[in-house]
Amino acid sequence: MKLDTFLSRLEQVKRRGGQWAAKCPAHEDRNPSLSIAEGRDGRILLKCHAGCELTAILSTLGLQAGDLFADHPGKPKRPGTKSAQAGGGARSPLRGLQQRISPPACL
């Protein structure tokens, strides 16, 4: 999910420097206590300063943790992770290795 789409689900969104603040949907929030930022890899970072758990915030919005990643649906695919190497992201450095190694001629 893109950050602007996520922000559109929240109330009283205000920009504060390189981050945003909004009312936390998981509790009765009079003053915006939810901090929202975007990580370098595009994921959405959340922190409720009143202490709400991430799962409670996402559940209230009808979302799951995977929705906080820009390349959702599915698991996040970041370079260097097993899921990225095995399937849809960076190519595994071991792929095709057996084809490039020839057996010794003296056997």
Image (tube, rainbow, N blue to C red):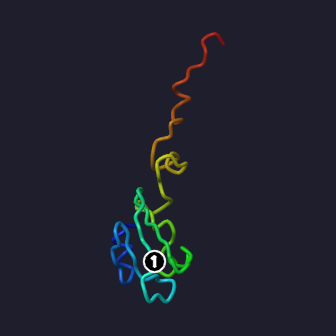
Quadrant of the rendering where the C terminus is positioned: top right
Quadrant of the rendering where the N terminus is positioned: bottom left
Residue 53 on image: x %, y %? 56, 76
Label 1 secondary element = strand
In this rendering, is residue 92 above or below 78?
above
- Residue at the spot x=43%, y=66% of the render? 44
How many numbered markers are drawn? Answer: 1
Nearer to the camera, 106 or 31: 31
In this rendering, is residue 10 above or below 85?
below
Residue 64 on image: x %, y %? 51, 71
User: Which amino acid lies under the numbered mark 1 shown in the image of this protein?
Assistant: Leu
In this rendering, is residue 30 above or below 53?
below
Residue 42 on image: x %, y %? 40, 60
- Residue at the spot x=46%, y=41% of the render? 91
Nearer to the camera, 105 or 63: 63
- Which image quadrant for residue 36? bottom left
10 Å crowding of disc 1: few (<14), some (14-19), many (20+): many
**Image check: 64 left or right of 36?**
right
- Residue at the spot x=51%, y=33% of the render? 96
- Residue at the spot x=48%, y=61% of the render? 74
Residue 11 on image: x %, y %? 38, 84
Q: Residue furthest front?
A: 17
Which residue position is annotated with label 1?
A: 34
Q: Residue furthest top?
A: 106
